[in-house]
Image (cartoon, rainbow, N blue to C red):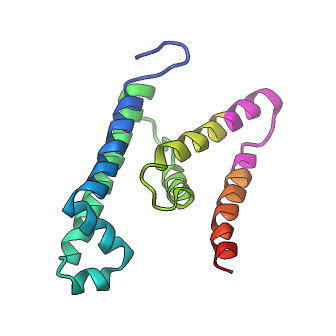
């Protein structure tokens, strides 16, 4: 535990380091460029000689390693025990964060922090004022909808 009140553990620093590492890898290395190119257009990447299957496997392994690391941080640093059904909505939140950040690796920590504030605030509002926690899903959906609709209106 780095700070007792509010509870802050070393997982935050580790998560920021991983986010910075992914950003540097995807923007400063040839492997990162190949990974981004394969994700953007696999056929064009294959035409330019990038091994698309290897990049797909690498991206899945990298995503799995980062997801496993986040699980270790949650269990070892926050809960201190394994709980069945622990944060079953992490996948949905990850997709929401990825869509709101629009593929910008530098924006992911800030968007994740914003979503975390919404989730924690919803939990506190449910405990204190009996507001349904599903209200935060509506707010997250509206934010996501407006971000995605901004692309539609920008193209017109």
Percent x, y of residue 29: 22, 57
Give the magenta-colored segment's residue range. Answer: 121-136
Question: 136 or 102, which lies in front?
Answer: 102
Residue 142 place in picture, x, y as percent: 72, 58
In the rendered view, does 141 fall on the left or right side of 87?
A: right
Q: Is residue 80 visible?
A: no
Q: Horizontal and vertical percent for residue 40?
A: 38, 74
* Above or below 46: residue 95: above
Residue at 21% in and 82% down: 48
In the image, taking residue 110 as reference, residue 53 lies left or right, namely left
**Figure disc tally:** 0
Give yes or no for residue 132 being in the magenta stretch. Answer: yes
Residue 113 appears anywhere in the view: yes
Residue 94 coordinates in the image, percent (x, y)? 49, 53
* Residue 2 belongs to magenta span: no
Q: Is residue 15 left or right of residue 30?
A: right
**Identity of the residue drawn at 42% across and 53% down:** 105
As drawn, is 125 to the left or to the right of 85? Answer: right
Q: Residue furthest top?
A: 4
Q: Residue at x 60, y 44 (%)?
A: 115
* Residue nearest the viewer, comparing 67 with 80: 67
Q: Quadrant of residue 14?
A: top left
Image quadrant in which the N terminus is located: top left
Report the predominant secondary structure element of the magenta stretch: helix
Q: Is 45 or 65 nearer to us in this picture?
A: 45
Q: Quadrant of the C terminus?
A: bottom right
Residue 104's place in the image compared with 133, above or below, is: below
Q: Residue at x 45, y 36 (%)?
A: 83
């Amino acid at each position: 535990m780095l700070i007792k009140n509010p509870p802050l553990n070393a997982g935050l620093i580790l998560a920021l380091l991983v986010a910075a590492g992914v950003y540097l890898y995807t923007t400063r290395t040839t492997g990162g460029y190949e990974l981004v190119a394969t994700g953007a257009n696999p056929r064009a990447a294959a035409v330019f000689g990038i091994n698309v299957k290897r990049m797909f496997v690498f991206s899945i392994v990298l995503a799995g390693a980062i997801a496993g690391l986040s699980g270790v941080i949650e269990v070892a640093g926050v809960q201190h025990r394994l709980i069945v059904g622990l944060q079953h909505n992490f996948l949905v939140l990850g997709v929401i964060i990825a869509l709101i950040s629009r593929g910008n690796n530098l924006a992911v920590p800030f968007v994740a922090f914003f979503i975390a504030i919404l989730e924690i605030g919803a939990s506190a509002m449910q405990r204190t004022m009996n507001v349904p926690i599903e209200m935060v899903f509506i707010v997250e959906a509206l934010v996501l909808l407006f971000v995605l609709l901004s692309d539609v209106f920008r193209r017109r």
